[in-house]
Amino acid sequence: MPDPTPPGPPPGPRDPGDAWAVGPDGTKAWGRFGAAGLLVDDGHGRVLLQHRVEWSHHGGTWGIPGGARHQGEDAVTGALRESAEEAGVPEDGVDLRHTAVLDLGFWTYTTVVGRASRPFDPVIADRESLALSWIPLDQVLDLPLHPGFGASWPALRDAITTTPHVVVDAANVVGSVPDGWWKDRAGAASRLLASVSALAAAGLPADALGLGFDRWWPRWTVVLEGAARGADDVGADVAVVRAEGSGDDAVVAATAAAVDAGDAPVVVVTADRELRERVGALGAEVRGPGWFREQG
């Protein structure tokens, strides 16, 4: 729980969000619009932690870069901004994984969890850090941790390698809605890819994937076959397989590759009965096209 008001930050221009939120019982928490921080791992068993400057809330402890959200700012944007300001974390150097939310009713703290997409060295970019270090996972508990981070760390640690992956059988999903897709299969596939790209950017609710926490950003693979292979390209956040032969075989191969890579849960979107049995035998979960449309 937030503690009584500590010494404030250095003077200077502030956003309206840089103020105390006050609960019904008088409890104060920093961030009028809530707060957010970034927990990023390097993919090699280390996480980036910040040794907090003495004047800050719970100064002298170790936690993650973060702070008050700005007015009108979502939690992910706030966490990425704060980590850039405090630790020099490149915004384009982090792949989002999931978010965890502590909700006190009058105030929220969102831990945005990501993985470095490329190596970078943290830089003390403002007055809020004594040190910034990549800490091995098995050494985190050896540090004097910020109480809030310390309480959340065990659950966050357990999920650090969890990597959900959604494989979409495009032919089955497109064919599930009689909207004239057969007149322009490539165009219909392009619209599907645009929808997948939007979901890749926004993430999925945790319960849609049967996972804990708040929201997840799974890996996405879409399998196209036949004339649909002429669909427009999309961003790098969606892997597109343009099957030369059987689309079903390509879906099975993509599923097997995801399972072999250690991704889990692997969710295949299709209503094809035989295909559902084939990917289920690989250990994948199956959702129908209706599930996919509900996410949009």
Image: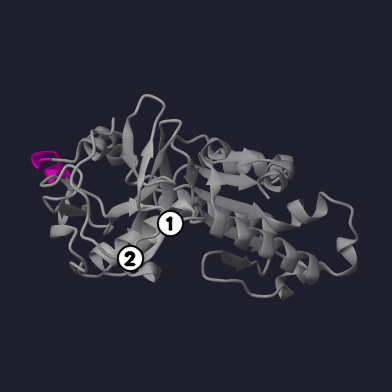
Q: What amino acid is found at the position of numbered circle 1 in the picture?
A: His
Residue 237: x and y in percent read 52, 65
**Helix, strand or loop for the magenta stretch, by majority:** helix
Residue 159: x and y in percent read 34, 41
Asked which secondary structure carries label 2, the reply is: loop
Asked whether the residues under the numbered discs 2 and 1 touch, taking CB atoms below 8 Å apart as contact, a structural biologist would say: no
Left or right of 53: which side holds 24? right
In the image, residue 123 above or below residue 156? below
Location of the N terminus (image quadrant): top left
Residue, x 13% and y 45% (percent of image)? 61
Residue, x 61% and y 55% (percent of image)? 251
Residue, x 67% and y 64% (percent of image)? 193
Asked which secondary structure carries label 1, the reply is: loop
Residue, x 37% and y 56% (percent of image)? 79
Q: Nearer the viewer, residue 1 or 209?
A: 1
**Residue 141 counted in the magenta span:** yes
In this figure, which residue is indicated by the disc labeled 2?
13
Residue 187: x and y in percent read 79, 70
Q: Which residues are magenta?
A: 137-144
| Residue at the farthest top position | 25
Q: Which mark is residue 44?
A: none
Residue 39 visible in the shown view: no
In this figure, which residue is indicated by the disc labeled 1?
70
Q: Nearer the viewer, residue 83 or 255?
A: 83
Left or right of 36: which side holds 292? right
Depth check, mark 2 against mark 1: the one in front is: 2
